[in-house]
Image: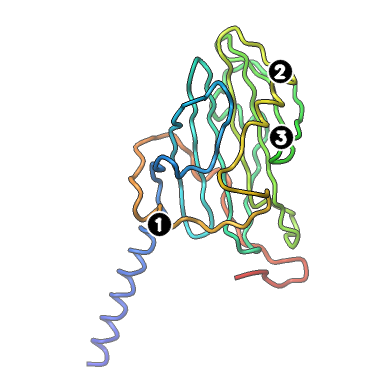
Amino acid sequence: MKRLASVTLIGASAILLAACNTATTRTVSTPAGAGHVLFDNPAFDGVAPVRVGWVDIWQEEEYSRFTSKGAQSEIIYSVADERDSIVLDFDMTLDRVIDNWHATSSRGDKGSAETPLGTFQYQHFSQAGRSCVGFFNEWDYRQGDRQLRPAKVLFGYYCGTSGQTLNRNDVANILGDIWIRDIDRTDYRFTPRLALASSGKPSSMGNLQFLYAPADRFVDADGERDGG
C-alpha cells in the first residue's frame, strides 16, 4: 500500500511538472495593450504593432513589428527576472542585428546615440533603396556578475519611407522615441508574467529565433549566489 502511494505520488508529480512546464514556457501572441516596447514616432501614429512574446520563469522576450506609411521597424526586447542573480547572455553585434532581418543589405557608418534608455549603438544600412538603421542597447548590469552582463537588452532596425534619408540627428530622434511601457527608471525590477504564458493565445508566427538573449544564473564575485 505504501509503495502504491509512492508510485501514485511520483506519477502525480510528473504530471504536475509537465503542466508547470507547459504553463510557464510558451510563445504567445501578446494581447493588445500588454506589450512592453513603445515606439512614439510620428511614422507609427495610431499603429497597433504585431507582438509575440516568449515567457518562462526567468525572463520574457518580446518581438514587436511596427508598420505604417511606408516605414517599418522590428524590435526584440529581453528582460530578466528581478532576482539579482539572473542576467542575460547577449552577444549580438550590429552586423548580426542587421543580418537577422536584412542579410543582403548594403552597410554604412556606425555611431552611438544617448537616449532615455541609455546608449544605443547603431549602423546605417540600405535595403531595396530605403534608408535604414540597425541598433542595439543593453543596460541594467548586475554588479555581482563577473562578466558584468545586463538584465535588459533591446535591438532591431528602422527603415524609413521611400526617398527618406536618415542622418545622424534623424537616428538620434528615432531611437529616443523608443521606450518601455510603465517604467519610471531603467533599472526597475521585473517579474515574468507567467499568466501571459499560461493563458495567452499561441503565436502562429514563424522564424522567430527565441531565445535571442537567454537568461543565466551567476555566482557573484565573492563566490556566493546572489538572490533567490
Q: Between label 3 and label 2, give the one nearer the viewer.
A: 3
**Circle 3 SS class:** strand
Task: Kindly identify the amino acid type of the residue bearing the numbered disc 3.
Answer: Phe
Of badges 1 and 2, the one in the foreground is 1
**Image quadrant in which the C terminus is located:** bottom right
Which residue occupies 72% across, 26% down? 172
SS of the residue under disc 2: strand
Quadrant hosting residue 119: top right
> Which residue does the numbered mark 2 point to in the structure image?
108
- Is the C-beta separation of discs 1 and 2 under 8 Å? no
Of all residues, the one furthest to the top in this rendering is 163
Mark before the other along the chain sequence, 1 or 2: 2
Distance, label 3 to label 2, CA atoms, is 16 Å
Q: Residue 66 appears at what percent x and percent y?
A: 49, 28
| Badge 3 or badge 2: first in the primary sequence | 2
- What's the residue type where badge 1 is placed? Ala
Q: Position of residue 165 (x, y in %)?
A: 66, 11
- Describe residue 7's horizontal placement relative to residue 81 as left or right: left
Q: How far across and down, in percent of the image, does residue 222 sit?
A: 77, 71
Relative to residue 160, is residue 54 depicted above or below?
A: below
Amino acid type, callout 2: Gly
- Residue picked out by circle 1: 195
The colour scheme is rainbow
Looking at the image, is 122 positioned above or below residue 223?
A: above
**Mark 1 and mark 2: Cα distance apart in space:** 43 Å
Q: Left or right: where does residue 77 sit relative to residue 148? A: left
- Give 199 or 91, whichever is nearer the viewer: 199
Q: Residue at x 41, y 40 (%)?
A: 32
Packing grade of label 2 (10 A; few <14, some 14-19, many >=20) is: few
User: Which quadrant is the N terminus positioned in?
Assistant: bottom left
The residue to which callout 3 is attached is 120
